[in-house]
Amino acid sequence: MKRYPNTPYAPPLPPGRQPLLWAALAFGAGIVAGSWWWRPPYLWVLGELVFALAGCYFLRRWAYGAMALGLGALFLVGAFRVQIAGPAEPLPESVSLAAGSEVQVTAHVLKDGLIKPRSQAGSSHLQPDPGPQILDVECEQISVDDRSSAAQFGFRLSVYGKSNDENDGAQSEPVRTFHYGERLRFPAKMYAPRNFGNPGAFDYRGYLAEKGIVALASAKSSEVEALPGFAGSRIELWRSRVHRSIVEKIYALWPPRQAALMDAMVIGEDAFLGRDTRTDFQRSGTYHLLVVSGMNVGILAFAVFWLLRRLRISEIAAGLITVGLCVAYAFVTDLGPPVWRATLMLALYLGARMVYRERSALNAIGAAALGVMMVDPQSLLGASFQLTFGCVLLIAAVAVPLLERSSQPYIRGLRNLDDIRYDFAMPPKVQQFRVELRMISGRLERVFSLKTFGKRIASPALAAVTRVALGAFDVLAISAILQAGLALPMAYYFHRATVVGLPANLIVVPLAEVLLPAAALAVAVGYVSPLLAKGPALIAGWALEGVAGSVRWLGGMHVADARVATPGVVVILLCLMAAVSAMVLAGRRGWLAAAGLAALAVSGLWITTVPPRARLLPGVLEFTAIDVGQGDSLLVVSPQRRTLLVDAGGMPGWMHSDFDVGENVVSSYLWWRGISRLDAVAVTHPHADHIGGMYAVLANFHPREIWISTGPENPEMEALLKEARGLGIAVVQHKEGDSFSFGGAAVRVLAPDPEIEATESERRRNDESLVMRVGYGDTSVLLEGDAERKSEQEIATEDPQSDVLKVGHHGSATSTVPELLAAVHPRFAVISVGARNNYGHPRREVLERLEESGVRTFRTDLNGAVTFYLDGKNVSPQLAALRR
């Protein structure tokens, strides 16, 4: 960028002149390599010494070579650091031995209890019956089999009250809320957290470990005894009281519907938001507003710093006050590393700005990132750090140089517009811009009858309108750069292409810049005078309605529901290269900067519009039992790579859970496989653990057909078929005796009997399951659904011989009868079953029958996702290679 001697602004140094930024990138690359490529620690140390000594040798002889060797040494240090990082704290032996059984626990509360309203599965409709109270507690003593021992570890406790059913139709028993520092004693069932055993699954265990939680437990509220005394930190006690008081103040200032959103956006409590609201924010690309994140910190910091400077407070004092308030905000919200990382980066940036002006912003960002990764190398591997760091880096390294060569000189040129002497401090193009504005202002003066009055308002009004237009350009440019640059992590972690993210952020970000400061002011003033707080509360409420309405409108568009599969390794590397090139070239000559921006835009467009190549083997029949807990979801891939999903798991209705197995488990696995669309789905029967996740699958993968049996109609199936027809999916009914080809595989339907009577009771619904035998060459697999004894006995007469058996009804004693085993004569069997399920599945007698028949049996609760490859002659089982 050309520099003008009289220009008061000096552009930032190019990224190549920012050593700490490159050091952070090298260290981070080493962490990524070390997390996947294990080598003995002494090899990493030896490599570090070689690179460091070589760098010292070339320091005076070859500067660029010395720098490259130094970065190589940091790469090896990062790999070494992540490999020596200790594993998550294991579950204490006393708990491991008693996992699933009841133990007596004495503990104290680490975080105030939170009671979430229950909601219907698949809906955001909140029920009056409250859900369990969720507590993070630290164990003091645990008793197992009359033996007591001291134990110190964190665990998450769910405290259940009496449900409406238990009260015989009466209102639910209110559950007392427990607060930080209280000591409790209670009997509980405790167990280790478990991840779903599928590649691409969310690391729930690691997520809890970051919060110091190594176990889960549940207890009844009536059995929780409050003990005398206090355990914990007085500072944390004060923080929790302040946090609780702010939440109460928010609900006092705004009506409940607004307060739930305000609570999430201002202080991070999102427990009372429905699923539909969350989905709209995600689909519109504005979810960063819904949870307290680095952007919230940045908006509040900008508002505070701007106000302090307008009050004629010195830059140093304003910076120190801003950082202090941001630290207090991060402390009160207590949302962990994301907010603290943003606060750290903000502090370093303001420090660099005060000492070196804006020229060392990238260096400050690199120093903050390097410090965080050295303390906690695992943080780099999480979506939160990558999104925060990527967002800040894209703004500082790409957006700021772009705006400094486009809009910012003209914005500065609007100052003192009527003062001709100020022109000489501006570049020639800006001088011309100021002259033209004064000419336009002169013409505007003629509109008014009084020349003096016209001159008084025409020039400021013209400058204000121009400043708003240039500000809109800035927001649009930053949003476009962030959308293109963050397309990769959004696709990798959230499988979303924020197609409407650009217009959505153009609308909601300015509103958020009004909302957050106004809300913070309303809460602060509310402690002094609730009457005076009504003004800023009303402004924040209007801004909130604008945000919510825009998000609801844009998120509800059909085009906004764009889901993408996990990008391949080559695409990931190319996108990273495009982002780095945009950062390196942003401060260079015009055509080079344009080339960098074009590369960034193409990478974002590619991620959004070009589906990755699915990881499917041609010429074989694949059958995979996906781990969905206590339910069924089976992926069948034909020799010609046509895809069929049989069932999609789901949560039982009595659990009143918000967790969507179809979205969070089944879809995640399919996206990890690179599957963007399914050819067909099948619903064996309308039970929640088979049909519940199918809504998300239909929306995410738009199958061409949905196969159903001919069983009796019911509300659950009717609702699903209405959804399918609305998406343009053809409904195909199959019954016993149907035979057809599916992508080179032969499908034969063995059940249900088309003569089944619609008046049979609900307990017979399992025998209405769609049962299919899928074959290729001389190999085949039998998919039973939840077929039970009567259906299995009929299937046994239909020549069902198969190499692989999907065991019926999760290994229930009512299924896998001897007659069926004798007729199928399988070599392999797989049971789709949930760990620690309430039904006792799989039953011991079923496992014994399979063992006596010489069947090699797999279980999803023990083995995770299990895949069988049938090549027409042989069957090869394969377990998922999971990093646990």
Image (cartoon, helix red, strand yellow):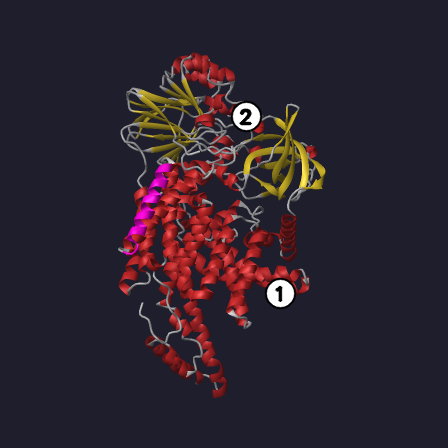
Which residue lies at the image location 38% right of the left edge and 42% below the top edge?
79
- For the C terminus, which image quadrant? top left
Q: Which residue bears the numbered disc 1?
A: 535
Find the distance from the CA under tag 1 to the CA under tag 2: 58 Å
Looking at the image, can residue 564 be seen? no
**Left or right of 46 in this view: 530:** right
Residue 2 % position (x, y):
31, 70
Residue numbers of the magenta segment: 42-60
Q: Which residue bears the numbered disc 2?
A: 762
Q: Is residue 52 magenta?
A: yes
Residue 374 % position (x, y):
44, 47
Mark 2 element type:
helix
740, above or below 228, in the image: above
All told, the count of numbered labels is 2
Dominant secondary structure of the residues highlighted in magenta in the image: helix
Residue 242 % position (x, y):
64, 53
- For the N terminus, which image quadrant? bottom left
Answer few, some or many: residues within 10 Å of disc 2's Cα (few below 14, many 20 plus, some between 14 and 19): few
22, above or below 227, in the image: below
Which residue lies at the image location 30% right of the left edge and 44% below the top edge?
570
Amino acid at circle 1? Gly
Q: Nearer the viewer, residue 211 or 692?
A: 211
